[in-house]
Image (cartoon, rainbow, N blue to C red):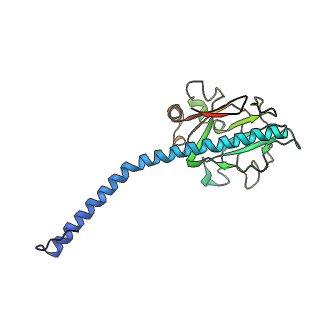
């Protein structure tokens, strides 16, 4: 720090304070510039992490369906905030199956723990024309809980299924004090493609603004109907 030998102590302290304020201002400006770019960086990383989680789960579900000669898949849904308010708007994905021992309704597959999508990422349906018309997202559809309920199912031969899903609502993921999802939000339709997006930003929007956000801020995930291969665009 510079000194001023010919000046009084109060004057020296005044100059020191001015220099300190200048340094603080510079740091604040640099932080304001860097925070948006860092946020974008972390969002981009979360997008890739979410894709990898879902790709791994889809591969595991397809293998389970083939090995056990049953239907199995991956379900993504917003957590039930009444169980834990801190999880409001948090998306969880899990491998689910139609247990051959008690067939007829899907439940959490054994050995596959639900995983939270990282970085506030969420998923939404695209196969249902209520939400997406093939070109744009529709404001009237995406405000519903059904939009963020995504189910991909494989048949015993490893190909994608198209029949609606029935859920075992007595399963731990839907009932009890530690339930993860609301059964009424799970939906019954299944799809072959869906969209990943920044849920932290999306859930602050409504109607047309939310739809417009998805049109330009999303990653489309496609699942090959024959091989189960996952790709993004």
| Camera-side residue of 213 and 100 | 100
Residue drawn at x 56%, y 47% as measured from the top left: 120
Residue found at the far top of this picture? 134
Taking 69 as reference, is 20 above or below it? below
Residue 154, by quadrant, is top right
Give the left or right position of residue 211, taking residue 92 as reference.
left
Residue lying farthest to the right in this orientation: 101
Task: Pick whichever, 141 or 196, lies toward us.
Answer: 196
Tally of numbered tags: 0
Quadrant of the rendering where the N terminus is positioned: bottom left
Q: Residue at x 73, y 55 (%)?
A: 178
Where is residue 111? Give x, y as percent: 77, 51
Image quarter hosting the C terminus: top right
> Going by the image, does 90 lie left or right of 70?
left
Residue 169 image offset from top left, x and y in percent: 79, 44
- Horizontal and vertical percent position of residue 123: 61, 39
Asked whether residue 33 appears in the rendered view, the answer is yes
Q: Quadrant of residue 48?
A: top right
Residue located at (73% from left, 28% from top): 226
- Outermost residue to the left: 6
Can you tell which quarter of the image residue 177 is in?
A: bottom right
**Residue 185 in sight:** no
- Horizontal and vertical percent for residue 176? 76, 53
């Amino acid at each position: 720090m510079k000194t001023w030998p010919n000046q009084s102590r109060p004057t020296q302290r005044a100059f020191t304070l001015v220099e300190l304020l200048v340094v603080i201002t510079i740091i604040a400006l640099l932080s304001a510039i860097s925070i948006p770019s860092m946020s974008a960086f972390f969002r981009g990383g979360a997008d890739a992490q979410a894709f990898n989680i879902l790709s791994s789960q889809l591969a595991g579900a397809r293998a389970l369906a083939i090995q056990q000669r049953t239907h199995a898949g991956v379900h993504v849904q917003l957590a039930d905030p009444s169980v834990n308010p801190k999880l409001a708007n948090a998306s969880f994905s899990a491998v689910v199956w139609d247990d051959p021992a008690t067939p007829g309704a899907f439940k959490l597959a054994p050995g596959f723990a639900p995983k939270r999508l990282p970085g506030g990422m969420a998923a939404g349906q695209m196969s249902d024309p209520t939400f997406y018309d093939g070109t744009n997202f529709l404001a009237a559809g995406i405000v519903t809980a059904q939009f963020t309920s995504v189910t991909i199912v494989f048949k015993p031969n490893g190909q994608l299924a198209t029949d609606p899903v029935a859920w075992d609502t007595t399963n731990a993921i839907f009932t009890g004090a530690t339930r993860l999802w609301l059964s009424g939000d799970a939906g019954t339709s299944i799809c072959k493609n869906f969209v990943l997006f920044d849920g932290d930003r999306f859930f602050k929007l409504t109607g047309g603004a939310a739809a417009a956000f998805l049109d330009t801020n999303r990653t489309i995930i496609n699942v090959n109907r024959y091989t189960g291969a996952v790709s993004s665009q």
